[in-house]
Image (cartoon, rainbow, N blue to C red):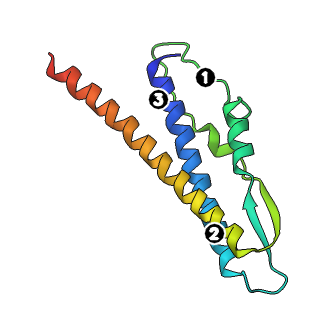
Amino acid sequence: MGPFKLIEQTSNLVEANLDRRNTSQRMISRNLANVDTPGYRGTNLEFEKQLRAALEGGVIPEPLARTHPNHLPLEPERPFDQARPVYMDTGPVQLDIEMSRLAENNIMFNAMVQLLTKKYSGLKNAINEGGASR
């Protein structure tokens, strides 16, 4: 596996993580907004189960190969876009549980943003330092 493939897969995974965290944020907000609504049942994403499946190869398809140098370059694959979110009924909304989910989701979202920032910062440094030595 080349270095660019590794960068691409990691970026796709982080992007998918951020998308799922965003969806989870909206669901938690909806649950909190309806905490006093009689009969309302909360929903949540089974996020970790999906992420684990993606990491174990349940989502990432085999890459295509260029068989001739004159073929057009392949578009970067976005394999996690095909993964459908899995929702679960969490029952009646409990304020303390939803607030802890909100805090956890916020921490994980910020961690993914920091990871992506460091990844691109390292790549930028490698490019800049490589260009300066010429």
Q: Amino acid at mark 1?
A: Leu
Q: What residue do we see at 55% from left, 51% from top?
A: 108
Q: At x 66% / y 80%, what residue is drawn?
A: 33
From the image, which quarter does the C terminus lie in? top left
Is label 3 or label 2 in front? 2
Instruction: Describe the element under mark 1 as helix, strand or loop.
Output: loop
Residue 64: which disc?
1
Which numbered disc covers residue 99? Answer: 2
**Residue 116 placement (x, y as % from top left):** 43, 42
Q: Do tag 1 and tag 3 residues touch (Cβ < 8 Å)?
A: no
At label 2, counting other C-alpha atoms closer than 10 Å, the crowd grade (few under 14, some 14-19, many 20 or more) is: some
Instruction: Please report whichever mark, 1 or 3, sits nearer to the chain's N-terminal start.
Output: 3
* Foreground of the two, 59 or 24: 24
- Tell me, for residue 7, which label it has, or none: 3
Front disc: 1 or 2? 2
Measuring from the top left, give residue 8's x and y in whole percent.
49, 31
